Amino acid sequence: MPSMLDAVVVGAGPNGLTAAVELARRGFSVAVYEALDTIGGGARTEELTLPGFRHDPCSAVHPLGIGSPAFAAMPLARHGLEWLHPELPLAHPFPDGTAAVLSRSVGETAMSLGAGDAGAYRRLVAPYLGHWNTFAADFLRTPWDGLPRDPYRYVRFGLTALQPATWISRRFEGERARGLLAGLAAHAIAPTSGLATGGIALMFALAAHDKGWPVPRGGSQAISEALASYLREQGGTIHTGAEVKRLDELPPARAYIFDTSPTALARIAGLGRAYQHYRYGAAAFKIDYALSGPMPWTAKEARTAGTVHIGPTAGEIDAALRAAVAGSDPRVPFLITSQPTVIDPSRAPAGKHVLWAYGHVPAGWEGDATEVIERQLERFAPGFRDLVLARAVAGPPQLARHNANYVGGDIACGAFAGLQTLIRPKLAKVPYATSHPAVFICSAATPPGPGVHGMSGHHAAKAVWRRLRATR
């Protein structure tokens, strides 16, 4: 190893590992330091409940992972990553036992919304279908980072994407389409009337049609392990159990890249109040279940879907998000659930299943939402409680301890609100750079934001190698 490294990465989440890989494959010497004993950050898999039940403590389903330009440029399959596609990416059940679906097929999706809205849905997505590769490259980045690859669709989608989901919902007549759209927009963890929530919903829909909403065989840890394996192949090193509290605790390097929250970065690198105006958002309350059998969803479509949204109406979904953002206790939460064992039986003992579910609660909330979450699940899957063998409950404090980037339980590493929706962590030509010329940030607090896609790490690495080449 050279006396001075080219780069040191702090944090072995998907973005940190991606940044390290991008530099190592270009011939730079790289070392990664991770505070925990295992790598992965928001992409990990653990036996949280009972032996043989493998749960994802953080992310579980990865439409932006399989659709990531950064991951697509790496031989991750050769390093053990295999994507598994459930029969349906997403189901959105209603109390009458029916469901709207988000399918790989646009036609199947459109018809599930009802005859009155099928045409409106087709018209909404038609201009972008089949263009995911250029579409993703144009939007999973800082908006001002060069000219778009597809200017026509960039402008057209941009004008739609800036709208609140509630505005786009006006294209539809019925609750089925509006509920499905609101559920997709809710991944922003912000009221669906917020700026650009329509873009979030539409991007997830397009990802489903072009790439699917898959899970990695064996769990989300497989993504992190594939990245780590490729990094080691390129000569990079990884050090776990190495918590970093000050910059001078790290070995000498030409650049330091932080896959951390802006708050942690400022503390460790001595940047003072550089990110004092950065805001964190509402939190998640998450429960992982070990089940004796498959979820008894009333809607048959939900039984084969990898992801199930429990709302059901746009009004209920928006009310749940507004309550969380306003600091109110949850009463009727909107739930995002994943059931990976419908496609990957290796995640549980024979005949058994795992269920991943979370609702939204105020930042730092210390209450217990187990009862209201299970009441919602029972509403759409009667008899669910009888199948529960064990549960692992994690409210905001537990989530923050599990992943230091989840400040106050905010799994998006920053509020999706106001100007911060488009400009994060602060206004800058290169948002990955800091006031310290050798210090960079690559976490989900930077563009394009949360999700296991590695694109924040990819763009941060690009900023670093430009700096390193210039100084060489």
Image: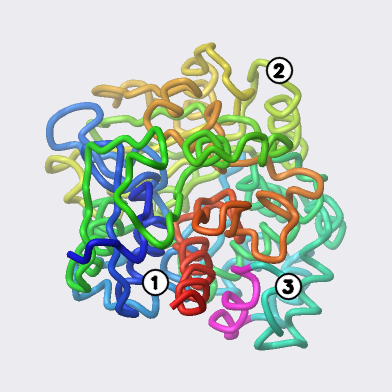
Q: Element under label 2?
A: loop
Name the one closer to the observer, 205 or 325. 325
Residue 284 in the image: state x and y as whole percent. Answer: 54, 31
Residue 327 in the image: state x and y as whole percent. Answer: 71, 20
Name the one closer to the observer, 395 or 343. 395
Left or right: 188, with 266 as reference point:
right
Given this view, does label 3 or label 1 mark the residue nearer the observer?
3
Mark 3–mark 1 Cα distance, whole angstroms, equals 22 Å
Given this view, does label 3 or label 2 mark the residue nearer the observer?
3
What is the number of the mark on residue 71? 1
Amino acid type, label 2: Ser
Task: Name the quadrant of the C terminus.
Answer: bottom left
Name the one closer to the observer, 378 or 83. 83
Circle 3 packing at 10 Å, graded few (<14), some (14-19), many (20+), is few
Left or right: 217, with 366 as reference point:
left
Query: Which residue range is magenta in the image?
Result: 129-141
**Looking at the image, residue 110 lies above or below residue 179:** below
For the point 72% across and 83% down, the residue is 127
Task: Name the quadrant of the N terminus.
Answer: bottom left
- Residue linked to disc 2: 328
Instruction: Give yes or no for contact between labels 3 and 1 (Cβ–Cβ under 8 Å).
Output: no
- Residue linked to disc 3: 144
Circle 1 packing at 10 Å, graded few (<14), some (14-19), many (20+), is many
For the point 56% across and 58% down, the residue is 437
For the point 76% across and 43% down, the residue is 417
For the point 54% across and 72% down, the residue is 209
Circle 2 packing at 10 Å, graded few (<14), some (14-19), many (20+), is some
In the picture as drawn, the residue positioned furthest to the top comes out as: 367
